[in-house]
Amino acid sequence: MNIPESTLPRVVVIGGGFAGVQLVKTLANKNLQIVLIDKHNYHTFQPLLYQVSSSGLEPDSIAYPLRKIIKKHKTSFFRLAEVHQILPNQKRIQTSIGDLSYDYLVIATGTKTNFFGNTTIEAHSMPMKSVPQALNIRSLILQNFEKAAIANSKEEREAFLNFIIVGGGPTGVELAGAIAELKNNILPRDYRDLNTQDMNIHLLEGAQRVLPPMSEHASKKAEKFLTDLGVKVHCNTFVENYDGRQVTTNTKLKFSSETLIWAAGVTGAPILGLDANTLLKRTNRYKVNRFNQIDGYDSIFALGDIASMSTEAYPNGHPQVAQPAIQQGRLLGKNLLKLINNQPMKPFVYNDKGSMATIGRNKAVVDLKHFKFGGFFAWFIWMFIHLMSLVGFRNRVIVFFNWTYNYINFDKAARLIIRPFKK
């Protein structure tokens, strides 16, 4: 791996997501050697992936080079690699580019798409957990528009213009709203030979309402916003199968569609090598204590989505969103310094700042501790918080410019098929 030998304690961080990046920033230029490992050389701002999928943003506006984050950290290193296994007895990891020893290991690998064992759906549907996957969805949507324009039959045209989104959480709701804006604002101008009414967006949610983690007030508002945009919402509906064209559900609803986007759940992305009892089988998350130490290991930690910390307020672990990951990363950085200096560590307490979701132009819902509201003001707050949360000044400027341009012109400028997608 070509990491220089050092007398400083070595902290190896696996994963450059919200938790890993925050930890590395907190430990910047301290008396430690930091090695950050990720299979991508960039940090992805996942809350805005849906805007890449729907042609609202280019991928470089939500991705940030990991090496740029640590460029001023004298004792920090980045390696582009996949970690295959942890050897805890030897305090060593095996990766695609070689082995590396550690004094402290932090696992921040996040989650991957959960297809709940349905291999047919996995083979034919479109996940959206990474930039390449978001670009695949963008290409497929635009390719379907082009194919619909030359389709020889009404049935074939409808299959290209039917978009099925499975999962009514924030990702599904936001993506459904964004595709609806493509239908309402782009299709009539770019594809005048297509009938806008032939395009349908179906949002399927297994629970009784969309946005199940949020309040009922937010759910009702979000469903109304979606309906106003022309999205057909189906609650209490599970997808039983999808063969690439036909969608079957538990409610006997059937759809003919070339595009099924899977946003119905995630599962942890653990690494081989640790005791099997450290993992919760249902969620594939590591069981950690209040200091983010994995059960049974004093020098191995887990952060963010991959960590399940059971507390009185969150018996099943914290929500798998950005804020718990960021807060855990920040605290663990401080706690590692305490641990090295033989000082007592501080237990983690999650500061829930609320949750939000945007449905489209001037439409969003926000749940705070004492206030719940929706509409233009909620949309403005959503934009401001996401803009300020982006890593890098350049990314904030680009996203702000794109949002301003899109708002004024009712346009999505990134509707380019750069890399055609083949099923």
Image (tube, grey):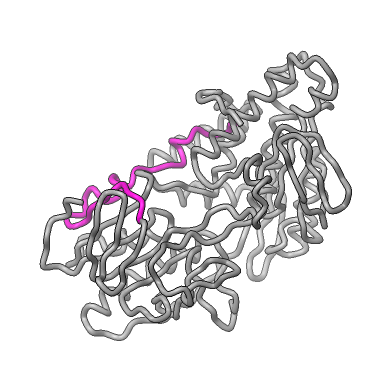
Residue at x 78% of width, y 29% of height: 159
Q: Is residue 57 above or below residue 64?
A: above
Residue 78 falls inside the magenta stretch? yes
Residue at x 72% of width, y 62% of height: 212
Residue at x 22% of width, y 56% of height: 76
Q: Is residue 351 above or below residue 197?
A: below
Q: Is residue 136 above or below residue 348?
A: above
Can you give x and y, in whole percent of width and height, for residue 301 in the image?
A: 37, 71
Can you give x and y, in whole percent of width and height, for residue 89 in the image?
A: 28, 74
Residue 194 falls inside the magenta stretch? no
395 vs 181, left or right, is left
Image quadrant of residue 116? bottom right
Can you give x and y, in whole percent of width and height, for residue 110 in the image?
A: 47, 58
The boundaries of the magenta stretch are 55-83
Q: Quadrant of the C terminus?
A: top right
Can you give x and y, in whole percent of width and height, for residue 15 in the image?
A: 38, 56
